[in-house]
Amino acid sequence: MKRNVRLMVALDTPSRDRALDLIKVLRGQVPIFKVGLELYTAFGPAIVREIRSFGVEVFLDLKLHDIPNTVARAAVEAARLGVAFLDLHLSGGPAMIRRAVDEVDAVCNLHGLRRPALLGVTVLTSLGAEDLPGIGVSRSPEDQVLALAALGKESGLDGVVAPPRELGALRAKFGPDFILVAPGIRPDGSPADDQARTLTPREAVDAGADFLVVGRPITGAPDPAAAAGSILRSILL
C-alpha cells in the first residue's frame, strides 16, 4: 500500500529567531515542526502558540515520563495548546499511559478540542544493542521496541516513535493504522551525529514510516529549503 508519508523538521535550537526563520523558509514544503526540550525549555508554551500562528502543525516532543497524575496533567495542557502530536515514554508503564489517554480524551471531548495523536517513545535512536544491558534491558533492540509498542497500543496510544531499523517489524505486527514516526533519518552522505541506528529517508518509507523526523541535515544545511526538497523528492520516487 502506498503511504502518504510526511516530513517533520526538528527545531532543535535554543534560538526563537532561528526557529521562526526556519519555519518561514520551510513552511511551503514542511507541514509539521517538532519542538523538543531545548526550544520548549527556553520559551515554554508561548513558542508553540507562535509556531502555530504560521499555519503549521506542532509535534511537541517532550517524552513525558513521570507518575501518572503528572504526565496526564501535562498531556492535557499540551492538548489545550493545540499540538497535533505529543509523545510519552512507554517505559513509564501502562497506568501512566492509560491515565494520559483517558484524561486527554475527556478534556478534548468536554471542550470540543482537537485531540492530539498520542505517541509512545520506544528505544531512543542514540542507543545501540550494546547500551541496553546497562539500563537493565536484556532483550534485543527489536524485541524491546516491539514489546513497548505492544504495551502502548494496548494502553490506547495512536502510534510510536521508533528507531528506523525496527519500522518493518512494527508495521508487520501492528498493521496500517498504527502511526509510525521515525527519527534518526539521515540522507545518503550525511553524518550520523549522535544517532546510533539510522536509515535514509527512502529506506524508512519503504519500511513503513508515516512520518520522518529530520533535523540537522535540513536545519544545518546552507540552504534548508533545498535540503528539504531533496529529501521530499527522494521519498516520492
Image (cartoon, rainbow, N blue to C red):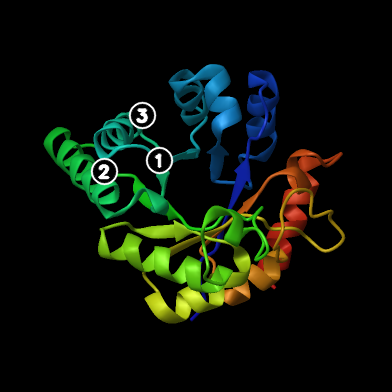
Q: From the top left corner, tell me how far across and down residue 187 is, in percent.
A: 78, 60
Q: Classify mark 2: helix, strand or loop.
A: helix
| Residue 178 in sight here | no
Q: From the top left corner, tell me how far across and down residue 208 is, in percent.
A: 54, 73
Q: Nearer the viewer, mark 1 or mark 2?
A: 1
Which residue is situated farthest in the left direction here? Answer: 110
Q: From the top left corner, tell me how far across and down residue 64 is, in percent.
A: 41, 39
- In the drawing, what numbered circle is on residue 100? 2
Residue pictured at 29% horizontal, 32% vertical: 70
Kind of residue indicated by mark 2: Ala
Q: Classify mark 1: helix, strand or loop.
A: loop
Q: Residues within 10 Å of mark 1 (few under 14, many from 20)?
A: some
Q: Classify mark 3: helix, strand or loop.
A: helix
**Mark 1 sits on what residue?**
65
**Mark 3 sits on what residue?**
81
* Figure check: 1 above or below 67: below
**Dot 3 and dot 2 residues touching (CB under 8 Å):** no
- In the drawing, what numbered circle is on residue 229? none
The mark nearer the N terminus, 3 or 1, is: 1
Residue pictured at 63% horizontal, 20% vertical: 16
Quarter-wise, where is residue 177 in the image?
Answer: bottom left
Q: CA distance from mark 1 to mark 2?
A: 11 Å
